[in-house]
Amino acid sequence: MLTRSRRRLAYLFTLAMGGILVTFAFVVYYFLVRERLRGFDLTLKNETQSYVSEFKYPLEKGEGQYRVEFGGTPLTSSSDMLKGFEFACWYNTNKSPLKINDNICPAQDLVKPGFQTIQFNGYPANYQQPLFRQITSSIQNGNNKIGYIIVAKSLEPVQEKLANLRFYLSMGVPTTLGIVGIVGWFLGGVAMKPTKRSYEQLQRFTADASHELRAPVAAILSNAQVGLLAPVDNSELPRQRLENIVDISKSMSALIGNLLFLARHEGRLNTKDLRSVEIIGLLKNLSDEYQLIAKEKELNIIAEVPSQEITLLADQDLLQQAIKNLLDNACKYTPEGGTVKLKAFSQMRRISIQIIDSGIGIPAEDLPNIFERFYRVDSSRTRSSGGFGLGLAIAQQIVKAHGGEITVDSIVGEGTTFQVCLPLRKVSNQT
Ligand code: ADP
């Protein structure tokens, strides 16, 4: 239980830190993208300004439109003189390209000043699509605004840097999370220490108290029993009293026994304390044993177990105790003439043992609490049968101690099925 709390603490700590870390990584990435783009845009703007100033834009005589000239001669191709740009296109204020022989620039529907990120189609699908940053800025001829220039530059250097950053983040975040998990586990251990200490103290106290109570209760019981054996006068009163003392002492002794049991067998059993147990034989013996009890109550006990032997690692006495508790309940809560079935089958390296009865059943609202200590569905129905509400808690504790699980299914008036699932661990040469 404490290990589970520690694991949970470490898990929640890692989850919380992970959330913060991932958010932080996203924020850092977002601001770095913005920062790099801003730097890129600034350089692009400066380069465009000095680029534009290298050209002249004289008015073409007769044709009434501007052309682009470099060093006194008209530019022959729009792909000439790119100076590191992906393309450069000049437009007049009517959005049609300025005159350049062999002009590859398309007429633009939109000439919007400012920056834009664009992508060219035509690259293979599996190729990392390169992005380009384009700037649209106005060009002047003297004081006249004669049009716009659009230049574009590859964003590859920025993309490369961001890809590197993404790589470092995708490696760094999981590694840091792993470290956080380990630290969380360690801190969980430190935080659980006082709880563990008081829990152990409490457990020791319950065990000691139960142990110490056993002797006086046993003394009361034996004295009362001796008193009953002695010849008594005609009065029924002392005899009745002694019988009451015997009954109460027996019940107290059972309660103390159960409490001691719960305090002693907390947690998972150590594998070196387990022995190989032939479970089918054990179930058959139990079914024979309960035939006698069943006869008194006119119950029908059926054993439905595989014919071949199945061996598992277990503490035989404890396992027997768990199944007995379930069989006791099945017999207790099944009216005369009913049936109690003990069924077993193995599947996927596990063995399932079912105790099915045709008894009074358990209401659905009680099922989630049924394994709690001292929980009784209806105290009136259990008082007559003398239960303390510890039988199922003990059965569950034993099954869990073996690494298994216990479940229940019930319909009121039709019956109840308890299922115990146990792992079939490899049996070494233990006896
Ligand atoms: P108790 O010793 O009181 O029987 P348990 O822990 O064994 O305590 O069971 C808890 C409660 O669950 C019981 O009070 C009983 O009402 C209910 N219960 C357990 N097994 C059965 C069953 N097979 N059929 C009906 N009710 C059951």
Image (cartoon, grey):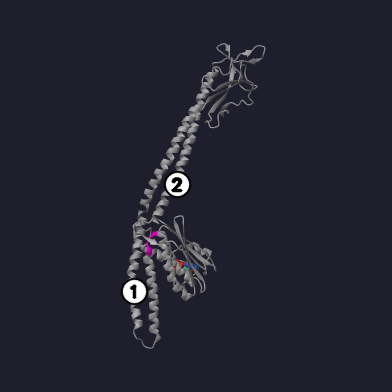
Q: Amino acid at mark 2?
A: Leu
Considering the image in quadrants, where does the C terminus appear?
A: bottom left
Q: Amino acid at mark 1?
A: Ala
Q: Is residue 92 above or below residue 226?
A: above
Given residues 10 and 24, the one toward you in this image is: 10
Q: Is residue 389 above or below residue 245?
A: above
Give the magenta part as a residue range.
312-316
Which of the 4 quarters of the picture holds residue 229?
bottom left
Q: Callout 1 environment at 10 Å: few (<14), some (14 to 19), or many (20+)? A: some
Q: Callout 2 environment at 10 Å: few (<14), some (14 to 19), or many (20+)? A: some
Q: Residue at x 41, y 68 (%)?
A: 285
Query: SS for tag 2?
Result: helix
Query: SS for tag 1?
Result: helix
Reading the image, the residue beneath label 2 is 15
Reading the image, the residue beneath label 1 is 218
| Mark 2 vs mark 1, CA separation in Å | 54 Å
Residue 88, x across and y down, in percent: 57, 21
